[in-house]
């Protein structure tokens, strides 16, 4: 009987793990050919890079929140009530695929900008740079808040 319980728990945990959302920084980047942008001029490339960068950053925040929520639900489920693990929303949805595609789009746009010699000073920040800056700002804000509380 004890062996059956262990098997049920192991299978439940395995099923739940498959159902968890992947953290966005662990998602693969989809390859997009820079040839897609061969007819774009530098202004069009830069405008598209700006849009893709902003959308990618928004998706990152949404996906990161989902992954964090799934991790919390997983922890609570494992500790308190393992059948609740079956209620995890589950997996990477269309947002995760869009995020991977947009990362590939940005890389293709960056390559196209270099090939067309668009000028480094005009190229917008990559989504990764924006995300890193936001994380640093949030850390500073939290550090300042904790210093003020003391």
Image (cartoon, grey):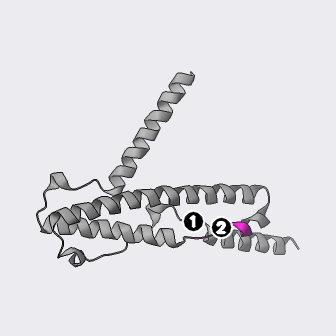
Extent of the magenta region: 86-91
Mark 1 is surrounded, within 10 Å at the Cα level, by few (under 14), some (14 to 19) or many (20 or more) other residues, namely many
Horizontal side of residue 72 vs 147, given as left or right: right
Kindly indicate whether the residue at mark 1 contacts the one at mark 2 (C-beta within 8 angstroms).
yes
Please report the residue visible at 61 percent of the width from the left and 72 percent of the height from the top: 18
Please name the predominant secondary structure of the magenta segment in the image.
loop
Residue depth check, mark 2 versus mark 1: number of the one nearer the observer: 2
Q: Which residue is mark 1?
A: 21
As displayed, is residue 52 above or below residue 139?
below
Q: Quadrant of residue 128?
A: bottom left
Mark 2 is surrounded, within 10 Å at the Cα level, by few (under 14), some (14 to 19) or many (20 or more) other residues, namely some
Q: Which mark is residue 10?
A: none
Can residue 89 be seen here? yes
As displayed, is residue 61 above or below residue 91?
above
| Distance between the alpha carbons at the discs numbered 2 and 1 | 8 Å
Image coordinates of residue 114 in percent, x first then y, are 15, 64
Q: Depth check: give the residue in front, 60 or 51.
A: 51
Q: Which residue is mark 2?
A: 89
Mark 1 element type: loop
Image coordinates of residue 66 in percent, x first then y, are 57, 59
Q: Quadrant of residue 82?
A: bottom right
């Amino acid at each position: 009987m004890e062996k059956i319980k262990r098997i049920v728990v192991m299978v439940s945990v395995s099923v739940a793990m498959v159902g968890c959302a992947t953290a966005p920084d662990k998602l693969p980047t989809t390859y997009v050919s820079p040839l897609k942008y061969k007819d774009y001029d530098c202004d069009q490339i830069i405008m598209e890079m700006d849009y893709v960068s902003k959308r990618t950053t928004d998706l990152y925040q949404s996906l990161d929140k989902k992954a964090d929520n799934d991790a919390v639900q997983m922890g609570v489920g494992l500790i308190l009530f393992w059948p609740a693990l079956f209620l995890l929303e589950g997996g990477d949805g269309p947002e995760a695929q869009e995020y991977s595609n947009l990362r590939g789009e940005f890389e293709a746009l960056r390559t196209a900008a270099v090939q067309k010699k668009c000028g480094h000073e005009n190229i917008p920040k990559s989504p990764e740079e924006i995300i890193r800056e936001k994380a640093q700002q949030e850390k500073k804000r939290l550090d300042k808040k904790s210093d003020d509380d003391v």
